[in-house]
Image (tube, grey):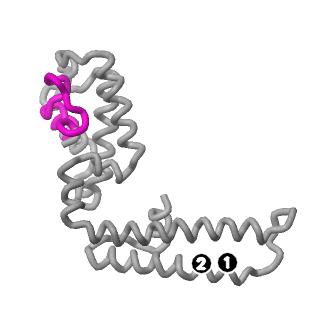
């Protein structure tokens, strides 16, 4: 999907065969237990990184014959190479949101938007609470950056944030996530 929907090669500068070789190298260099449905985004990110390196260095060893370079005959123009490197870097910087660049996945989210909307509402509420907490923290410090006294308003703002994290945590467990603690959920929601 990344090749066809994002990069759109005009010829076969980057082929699905090359991408399959990247996947084979990743499988070869990592333990099998690391590959599961919950790590898909991690491996998509890693595969994009490997593709970017292959485009920059113009080197991608063939999995079956390692001294053969699959990038030698790809006829990649320099302007196209630069564009693809920038595009891949942007996708990697987007983190999990990169999958929205893929029309089939975006369409699936549009067809079944409720879980996505549910999470987005909670994340937005978390971000707003975080801003209010940061604002309150700055106002409750003296000129030496020391807190004057316990702030009841600050504690009141923390309570709904904890409730949202708990709600997301429980929903994650219900759908089969292996999340371990509330702190991880809190940190990932505010990334």
Query: Is residue 4 at all visible to an observer of this figure?
Result: yes
Using the numbered discs, state the Cα–Cα distance from disc 1 to disc 2 in whole angstroms: 6 Å
Looking at the image, residue 37 lies above or below residue 2? below
The residue indicated by pointer 2 is: 158
- The image quadrant where one finds the N terminus is top left
Label 2 CA crowd tier, 10 Å (few <14, some 14–19, many 20+): some
Q: Position of residue 4 (x, y in %)?
A: 17, 37
Q: Nearer the viewer, residue 190 or 109?
A: 109
Towards the viewer: 100 or 177: 100
Q: Residue 112 at what x, y percent from top left?
A: 21, 67
The residue where tag 1 is placed is 154
Please name the residue shown 34% across and 36% down the image: 88
69 in relation to 32, above or below = above
How far from the left and from the top, in percent, is residue 177?
30, 71
Give residue 147's position: percent from left, percent from top: 80, 72
Q: Is residue 95 left or right of residue 149?
A: left
Q: Residue at x 17, y 20 (%)?
A: 68
Q: Which residues fall within the magenta stretch?
A: 3-23
Question: Tags 1 and 2 in contact by the CB under 8 Å rule?
Answer: yes
Q: Residue at x 19, y 59 (%)?
A: 108
């Amino acid at each position: 999907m990344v090749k066809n929907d994002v990069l759109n090669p005009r010829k076969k500068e980057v082929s699905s065969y090359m991408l399959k070789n990247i996947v084979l190298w990743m499988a070869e260099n990592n333990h099998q237990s690391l590959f599961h449905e919950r790590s898909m985004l991690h491996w998509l990110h890693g595969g994009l990184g490997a593709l970017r390196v292959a485009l920059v260095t113009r080197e991608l060893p063939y999995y079956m014959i390692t001294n053969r370079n699959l990038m030698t005959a790809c006829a990649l123009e320099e302007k196209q190479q630069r564009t693809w490197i920038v595009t891949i870097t942007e996708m990697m910087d987007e983190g999990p949101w990169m999958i929205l660049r893929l029309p089939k996945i975006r369409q699936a989210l549009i067809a079944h938007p409720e879980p996505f909307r549910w999470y987005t509402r909670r994340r937005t509420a978390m971000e707003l609470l975080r801003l209010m907490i940061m604002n309150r923290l700055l106002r409750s410090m003296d000129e030496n950056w020391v807190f004057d006294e316990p702030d009841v308003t600050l504690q009141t703002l923390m309570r709904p944030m904890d409730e949202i994290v708990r709600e997301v945590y429980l929903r994650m467990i219900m759908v089969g996530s292996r999340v371990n603690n509330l702190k991880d959920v809190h940190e990932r929601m505010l990334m």
